[in-house]
Amino acid sequence: MSLRARLLLTLGVSLALLWGVAAAWLLSDLEKKFVETLDQRLAQSARMVAGLVLQLPEDVWEQSQTRSLSIPPIEGLACQVHSPRGDIIARTHANMDTILAPGERGHAYRQEGDTTWRVFTYERGDLVITTADRMDERDMLLSDVFRVAVVPFVVALTGSLIALWVVVWRGLAPLSRLRESLASRHPEALAPVSTYGVPKEIKPLIDTLNGLLVRIQQTIVREQRFTNDAAHELRTPLTAIKTHLQVAQRAEGDVAKEALRCAEAGVVRLAHTLDQLLTLARVEGRMRFDDGEPSQVAEIVEFAIADSVATAGQCQPPAHVPHVCVAMPRELAITALRNLLDNALHHGADDLPVVLTVQPSPDQRHVTFTVHDQGSGVDEATLKQLTQRFWRVSKQQGSGLGLAIVAAIVERFGGWVSFENVESGGFSAHLSIPILPDPILFTSSLPTPTGGD
């Protein structure tokens, strides 16, 4: 069932039930008031007749000893007056002795043939007055009153249902236009849906849809960029490997061995580049990472140094490591710090060690890993290009993805990375990662990447 039909059915049934209950309640009260009013009229008629009879002259009373007085009939009413001895003094109808006979005081129902009468008996002084109404006339009058009361309800209910249908139809028209707009869009069109003139109740839906389109577009861009990067970066090492293998097949001796060695080095570089590309694609994607372990700073430092290309004495570990956990999966934190260490080891001074320090921020919200080398540093223009993909200071070294991976990791988890030339000499990289107040477990689907820039 469509939303429009469900809404119309629900509101229509609810409206009809409410109007029906209100009408039944009103008619029930109306019937009670109607019966009370007619009974009061019947009683008032008896009291009026009693007052008139008591005011009659003496000569009229003398005539009543020989014959009954004739009271002018009132439309819809019958009346009869009895003396204390039970004699009929006055009456409106001569053929209603059974109905108008004296009885208990008050209202009662009496039956004569197929006709039911509503009777009221009233005593005043020595007189007994009985008045009566025909119930069929009462019922006819009550039916007319009901008809007059019900017709406006029916008209109002019908008009309300029609107005409800029009309001619902027009109110849901923006959804129909949105559906038609989406149905007519080109399959590859990812432009945001316009929110101009859209009701505020539907705007969050369109905003969410536009957010989904943006994410889809970003995913497509990432896939296209990954494909282009892979095709561009893998073409050169594959060509070199093929060339070296061809030389090895044709040559002998040391030349063949050198060609095989170069081919093997090309395979290692190719594997390293593929690994870096996959790591970057996964970090920039929406995958969840979790290795089931809290990211202790001490473990991050230990494993990052162990996984780096540093040899004995090339990396000076921090003298003090704070006992905190970071809000980042451990393997990604290790990868980011290791890539910074590898970058410093590749481009720093060969005879001086790389210095690693760890310092929490004053507000205890972030912890900063600082990697400092004693190299010559870089110029200001180069500082802005360090995290670009495939950008290298040296064309013969690295894949150009190490620092790009670091930037992608910290961006995803709310950290940042910065670089600076130190005035006293050397180059420093600062990696800031949010601190986790309470250690939690992550879910990981990414194996530990190997290698740095």
Image (cartoon, grey):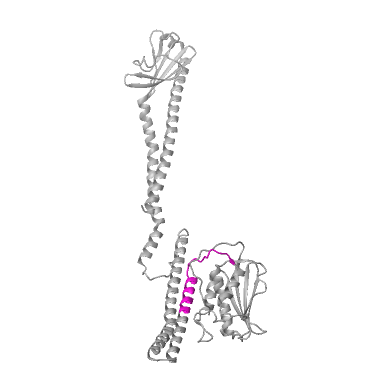
x%, y% of residue 93? 36, 17
98 in relation to 382, above or below:
above
Image quadrant in which you'd find residue 141: top left
x%, y% of residue 397? 52, 85
Q: Residue at x 54, y 73 (%)?
A: 335
x%, y% of residue 344? 59, 81
Residue 295 as seen in the image, left or right of residue 8: right
9 in relation to 253, above or below:
above
Residue 188: in magenta span: no
431 in relation to 80, above or below:
below
Q: Number of marks in the image?
A: 0
Front position in the image: 200 or 19 = 200
x%, y% of residue 349? 61, 86
Residue 38 as seen in the image, left or right of residue 333: left
Q: Is residue 332 visible?
A: yes
Front position in the image: 448 or 96 = 448
Q: Is residue 160 visible?
A: no
For the record, the magenta segment spans 271-295
107 in relation to 16, above or below:
above
Front position in the image: 185 or 256 = 256
Residue 284 as seen in the image, left or right of residue 246: right
Front position in the image: 422 or 169 = 422
Find the residue positioned furthest to the front: 253
Residue 276: in magenta span: yes
